[in-house]
Amino acid sequence: MQRESETFSIISLTSTSIILVLGNSMLIPVLPEIRHDLQLTQVQAGLILSIFSIAGAITIPFVGYLSDRFSRKDIILASLLLYGIGGFVSGIASVMEGSYSFEGIITGRVLQGIGSAGTAPIAMAIVADLFAGNKQLKVLSLMETTNSLGKVLSPLLGAFIALFMWHYVFFAFPLACGILFIMFFLFVKKEKSSSDKMVFNNYVQHLAGVMRENKFYLLTSYSAGALCLFLLFGLLFYSSDVLENTFETHGFLNGVILSFPLLFLTLSSFLTGNIIGKFSNYINRILMVNFLLLSGFLLGILLYDSLWWTILFISLISTSIGVVLPCMNAIITNSVKKEARGFVTALYGSVRFVGIALGPIVFGYFMDFSISTIFILSSLLCLFQAILCFFYLDKKNRSVSAHDILNWFTLFHLPFQRNKQRG
């Protein structure tokens, strides 16, 4: 009986990842239709996606504090309620199709974004509280896998609903949030309140100390997660537009085609989650290699203008991202002690939201005049991130000084100097 209860608890916790990803992925294949019907610009259409993530990114640090100060379960339940209300507001505004429909949709999306801040990021902290060792790694990886699975199913679900009417997509959010609300209420135990919770001033001082002690380690981890989500959602936004306007595919077919890269993301996340415990001492090297691969794949897209060539390389990019994200979850949740875990995991969720928010906006901006520029810049960012992972994500040495980098460069350059002297 206890094992069965634990299973339902894990299902409830990992399902927060699916709810989180529904917020954007389900709208991607129907965004061209929304833009056409409401006569929106490319930037306005991108804002429907991005405002959700911007609101979440701003809210998450505050929710992180609340989850460390009060009950994480209560925070998640309240967040699911707000998330569902936001979807209902956007749905009503879209059906009205008046002069303020866009503003109404944006208002609902802001509410959804605020609600999303207290879902998967806080659930990650609960997982770290409840489990340890390999089991913790497996559950965290399962969260990333369900997140990826949600990305696969969401475009298909959104495109299917849009076969009837695209407005109905917004009403799917209250339904999904309601189901998870009931599951969470029934199967996830409320943690016991602790009498040694820190007051706000002491909490802030403690966090400041944690951030100073682990600054390079955490900043590198945060930038890695943000970059991956920036690339993923930027490429999905780009693909949706290219499918509609260049290759003239529409509706449900768009959802099917976009699901292929996301399927590779899901599979790689799942496989990585099952083996990550065996290679925990080599995570920094795994991350470095995959960011180097991402740098090359982004340039590879530009070599040939074809639908299947584009989908192939976006699938390869998704595969590497699927390897990176479970590794980042493991790094973040185990980087600090329990007292600051809610804030640190929430802040990680926040920077991931920033990446999701910037992806459609930045790619949409460059799509108007030079798409090759954003691919080249993204490739360079991945190369830089690989260098950061090499220096700052070594478990045994989280801080590398400028002197260390200079010594490393000198050792690398020394053989060339000797050869020059011999010559």
Image (cartoon, rainbow, N blue to C red):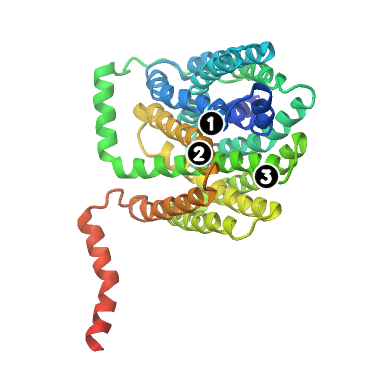
- Which residue is pictured at 42% across the width and 55% down the height? 383
Residue 362: give x, y in percent of width and height: 49, 39
- Which residue is pictured at 70% across the width and 51% down the height? 307
Distance between the alpha carbons at the discs numbered 2 and 3:
27 Å
Q: Looking at the image, tell me whether mark 2 or mark 3 is earlier in sequence order.
A: 3
Q: Quarter-wise, where is residue 6 in the image?
A: top right
Distance between the alpha carbons at the discs numbered 2 and 1:
7 Å
The numbered disc on residue 117 is none
Q: Looking at the image, tell me whether mark 2 or mark 1 is earlier in sequence order.
A: 1
The residue under label 2 is 365
The numbered disc on residue 263 is 3
Amino acid type, residue under disc 2 in the picture: Tyr
- 10 Å crowding of disc 1: few (<14), some (14-19), many (20+): some
- 10 Å crowding of disc 2: few (<14), some (14-19), many (20+): some
The residue under label 1 is 43
Quadrant assignment for the C terminus: bottom left
Asked if the residues shown at circle 2 and circle 1 are in contact, with their CB atoms under 8 angstroms apart, the answer is: yes
Q: Is residue 300 left or right of residue 401?
A: right
Q: Is residue 184 left or right of residue 154?
A: left
Closer to the camera, 364 or 221? Answer: 364
